[in-house]
Image (cartoon, rainbow, N blue to C red):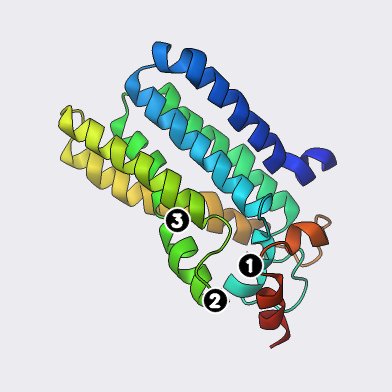
Amino acid sequence: MNFYRRNWYYIGGVIFVALSYYMGFWGVHHLSHIQVILTYSFMAMLVHQFEEYGIPGGFPSIFNIAFAGQKKDVDRYPLNANTAMINNVFMTYPFYILAIVFPGAIWYGLIQIGQGMVQILNHGIWNNEKLKTWYNPGLASVVFLHWPIGIYYIWYVSTNHMVTVSDYIIGFIGSWLTMLVLWLGPVKLLSNRKSKYPFTKEQMYRYAEKKVKQILNS
């Protein structure tokens, strides 16, 4: 488990490559169009996670220091390596895959694609304001993957009369609730200054190391 805890985002990258071959040679011809879109949305999330933790990485320090404003135990509080694995894999993977398995639940599909789109706030605004920069790990995948895929899904279900007003309402509200259920909630519940699962220095400081450490030492 320790190996997976340290490398889940790289394994997610391998899953992304496998899904790319699967979709290119088989999936697009055998899955419904809705399932194809939602699978690409899941793949976008895999890229998003790799961008945050792998390349360029450094999200743990940005979250704990810049976003949460912590000065102490920053390698494990409030976000630690175990919590990151739990909410990114064991909670987020099923959340995205369920939408693919049940494509007829348009309201759930809207929540799934909306979950990636609402992250424009933390990656596009909040984190950049804290870092005084124009980019932070996770922003590129939100802008170039989650938003185009999300817009296309909304356009597709709308033009094909597959969506109702209640679907839109549930999808909109649910998208925002996922920020609490999938991310902020687990981090809060599992936060522990004495956690046995700190991030490594490599995981902590990859992108914007100087800016983050300036905040830490200010």
Task: Name the image quarter holding residue 5.
Answer: top right
Q: Residue 30 vs residue 17: left or right?
A: left
Pick whichever, 135 or 82, lies toward us: 135
Q: CA distance from mark 1 to mark 2?
A: 9 Å
Q: Residue 1 vs residue 95: left or right?
A: right
Q: Residue 45 vs residue 149: left or right?
A: right
**Mark 1 secondary-structure assignment:** helix
Label 1, on which residue? 62
Does 200 appear above or below 133? above
Q: Which comes before the other along the chain, label 1 or label 2?
A: 1
Q: Position of residue 177 (x, y in %)?
A: 41, 52
Does 176 appear above or below 31? below
Does 173 appear above or below 13? below
Amino acid type shown at disc 2? Lys
Amino acid type shown at disc 1? Ile
Pick whichever, 71 or 121, lies toward us: 121
Does 31 appear above or below 165? above
Q: CA distance from mark 1 to mark 3?
A: 15 Å
Report crowding for label 1: few under 14, some 14 to 19, many 20 or more residues within 10 A (C-alpha): many
Label 2, on which residue? 130
Label 3, on which residue? 119
Task: Name the image quarter holding residue 200.
Answer: bottom right
**Mark 2 secondary-structure assignment:** helix
